[in-house]
Image (cartoon, coloured by chain):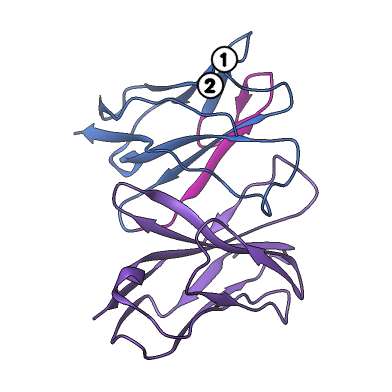
Amino acid sequence: DAKTTQPNSMESNEEEPVHLPCNHSTISGTDYIHWYRQLPSQGPEYVIHGLTSNVNNRMASLAIAEDRKSSTLILHRATLRDAAVYYCILRGAFYNQGGKLIFGQGTELSVKP
Amino acid sequence: EAQVTQNPRYLITVTGKKLTVTCSQNMNHEYMSWYRQDPGLGLRQIYYSMNVEVTDKGDVPEGYKVSRKEKRNFPLILESPSPNQTSLYFCASHKAGARGAAQYFGPGTRLLVL
């Protein structure tokens, strides 16, 4: 499985945009880019995913580089409830081990009031 | 409301005393998995199931059993728990057929084995 690299931690101010980067230089042409987050004392939560084009949903936006070797999760206005560990995960072409998600260390986002 | 539920949420037990952690989903998902989360090791898959009566080992299956007799339920069984199974456990489910399918996780079960 292709690996992802994320910064260990980031800080943001409340109500400001946050850009969370992820490098995945060994991504294959059929890998989807997924983002999950884990709030304190909760299970992981799906945020967004994409393949080639930028994607938007009610939670966030995903910007994917043209060469697909990196992506950025964008939270348009951070709130205190967005403080969490954010994981960037690649999903391959086949359901390896029932769709197993490989969680790295993620980026711990703290949001200051 | 679409959700994955787990019970119990917290459990303290002693070595060797059999226990079962239940997991149930109400989204008619085919795929279900169990993960454990440990500091410094992240989340690791224990077992998974692709449908009723279809289960297989994940990355760390030793000491665990599962069953899938109904589509909605996927219990995790520890026949003889040991202290190294002290961990935070998550059940997850998702729909088959799309690599983009979001996975839904339960709230977690924190287990302490003395």
Can you give x and y, in whole percent of width and height, for residue B89 in the image?
42, 66
Q: Which mark is residue A24?
A: 2
**What is the letter of the purple chain?**
B
| Quadrant location of the C terminus of chain A in the rendered image | top left
Instruction: Name the amino acid type tagged 2.
Output: His
Q: Seen from this angle, which residue lies furthest front?
A: B62
Q: Are marks 2 and 1 in contact (CB under 8 Å)?
A: yes
Q: Nearer the viewer, residue B28 or A13?
A: B28
Residue at 51% across, 74% down: B64
What is the chain identity of the residue bearing mark 1? A
Chain A's colour is blue
Q: Nearer the viewer, residue B49 or A86?
A: B49
Image quarter of residue A91: top right
Residue B107 visible within the image:
no
Residue B3 visible within the image:
yes
Residue numbers of the magenta segment: A42-60
Which type of secondary structure does the marked residue at label 2 adopt?
Answer: loop
